[in-house]
Image (spheres, helix red, strand yellow):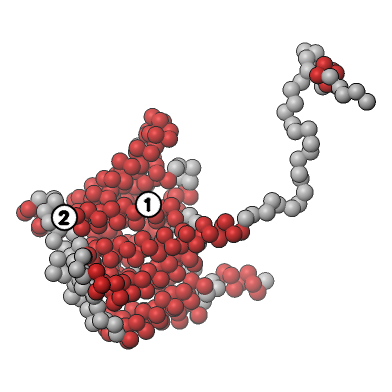
Amino acid sequence: AAPLSAKSIARLRPLDHRGGAMKLTEPLLPRFSGSKKPKVNCSQQAVATALAFACFVAVRSVHPIVIDISKTDGKLPYGKATPCVINSAVDIIVGNGLAFLIGGMDGLKQCWDPKPLKVFSAIAVAYAFGDFLEMQSMSVMGGSAYQVLLQSKLLITALIMWLVRGQGQTPLQWNVLATIAIGMSAFVTVDAGPSSAPFNPIGIFFVLVKVCFSCACAVLTEKYLKVYSNMPIYVQVAQLKFVWLWTSLLLTFLFDRKVVEHGFFHGWDGRTMVVALSWVCKGWSTFLVLKTLNSVLKNIGEAVAILVIFVFDVAVAGAVEEYLPVHGKEFHMSSFLVVLVVVLTVATYAMAPTSAQIANGQK
């Protein structure tokens, strides 16, 4: 049979109300409407998760190490919270810049929308206090001790959820949380001394208060980020960092005598700039990487960071003493075993079934 011409094909098209040929808006072949879903490339998803996990562990471990390296004779020579102020200023510029480049003036105006700005400003005040307390604690203890004590957030979060929402833990989870608390106490007791600072008990108080602020911020952020989930992440960062900047600056001038007497940049050097950069990387990775990781991997990553910092202190710091202002620690089997206990216990808690999961399993 002879092939149809273009004119013959046009005559076969249905006519619209004006008598002209209608345009085909649907594909000629029927779309797949079966119950089978397209296959997801599991290998690519696994690689993405593994890279996100590695990035998260790297940032969480490098950040305390960088702060340790910035110390001189075990003390921070600069205003403790000044890198946090610079971090907030950089994040505001980056957030507004991305909003303008991607969305133009409409995107830039979204960064200053007063309704969500009020909500994020209240959360930002708590975040600024948390950053300030982190630098205060790091000024009197080393990175490994800080990261170990930071795991107390699991216990404090569980208590907050129990008191506020009535969401309890299983007996297994409570036992694991108690083991974590005992492990943290054991590490502080047997640790021969952090990498760059003598241990001071006031550091425990700073860490615990910082953890309380972090837990409150996590609950509020989770709630309101869902409300404003349509906002791009860079807009959310720009709004959070506005009041965050001014709160950090206020805390710096109220509680840091060095800044008041000698100026904001007193004691700054190349190491301090790296600390500020570390704060920037930590903040953006928290917002971006954690979208790929679930809560289980996040908690395990925090625990693995303890082991990375410990290995740096006992194996790497001594080898780079000639190039970096760090001092290695002697390897103590007791400290190493306690670190392993804390890491594995946190991983056990992260993988333990919750009350809701057990209840659903019984139905």
- Residue nearest the observer in this picture, 216 or 189: 189
Nearer mark to the viewer, of 2 and 1? 2
At numbered mark 2, what does the secondary structure look like: helix, strand or loop? loop
Q: Which residue does the numbered mark 1 point to in the structure image?
A: 284
From where the camera sits, is residue 276 visible? yes
Residue at 80% from the left image edge and 13% from the top image edge: 19
| Apparent side of residue 142 relative to residue 311 in the rendered image (left or right) | left
- Label of residue 179 in the image: none
Q: Is residue 332 left or right of residue 29?
A: left
User: Which residue extends farthest top?
Assistant: 18
Real-space Cα distance between discs 2 and 1? Answer: 23 Å
* Label 2 Cα neighbours within 10 Å, binned few <14 / some 14-19 / many ≥20: few
Sort mark 1 into few (<14), some (14-19) or many (20+) by Cα contacts within 10 Å: some
Amino acid identity at mark 2: Asp
Identity of the residue drawn at 37% across and 57% down: 217
Q: Identity of the amino acid at label 1?
A: Trp
Relative image position of residue 137 (x, y in whole percent): 23, 67
Assign a secondary structure to mark 1: helix
What number of labels is visible? 2
**Corner quadrant of residue 363:** bottom right
Q: In the rendered image, which residue does mark 2 sit on?
A: 269
Q: Is residue 141 visible?
A: no
Q: Mark 2 or mark 1: name the one nearer the start of the chain.
A: 2
Rendered position, 214 above or below 357: above
Residue 163's x, y, as percent? 42, 68
